Image (cartoon, rainbow, N blue to C red):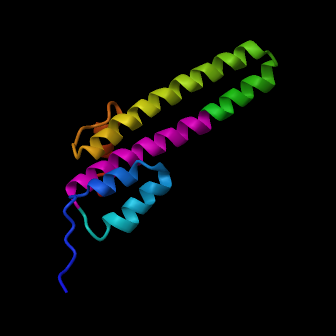
Amino acid sequence: MEPIVNTDNGKTVGIVSYLTIIGWLIAYFGMHQSNKTSFGSYQLRQTLLLHLVSIAIWIILSFVISAMFFSTGTFGIWYLFVLIEWGIRIGLFVLWLLGFIGAVNAQEKPIPIIGPMAQKMFPGI
């Protein structure tokens, strides 16, 4: 029986890593550990930082918006913060989409703002 040869050079790892933090965990522990590639590592570093930034922003904005709503009691200020939150979410989605398109096309294109930092922050992946 011939061994199975993986010819995607980490493309599948890159794509799966963009599908939520659970996808990242599956890509890293289930796929990347047994077949490490430079492209897979590159995408895993980018998506890890993107997921961490998204989670941190979500937590911070949840506290800020809740505090504004309950402390001021005015709908206008709370509504303004909700609009700001959605602007940030749309920006994060655009970053995610740019990275995902790069992974699908098997290109090592850094995600704006996050990509270069991720490569420096997580060299061990």
77 and 99: which is toward the camera: 99
110 and 90: which is toward the camera: 90
Which quadrant, please, contains the C terminus? bottom left
Where, by quadrant of the figure, is residue 57 drawn?
top right
Magenta stretch: includes residue 58: yes
Percent of width and height locating residue 2: 17, 82
Tell me what residue is drawn at x 47 percent, y 39 percent: 53
The residue lying furthest to the top in this view is: 76
2 and 36: which is toward the camera: 2
Tell me what residue is drawn at x 47 percent, y 45 percent: 52
Magenta part of the chain: 37-60
* 1 on left or right of 68: left
Query: Is the residue 27 above or below the residue 60 in the image?
Result: below
* 75 on left or right of 13: right
Percent of width and height locating residue 34: 29, 71
Where, by quadrant of the figure, is residue 116 drawn?
top left
Magenta stretch: includes residue 71: no
- Tally the marks: 0
Where, by quadrant of the figure, is residue 79 drawn?
top right
Which quadrant, please, contains the N terminus? bottom left
Prevailing secondary structure of the magenta residues: helix
* 48 on left or right of 69: left
Percent of width and height locating residue 25: 44, 59
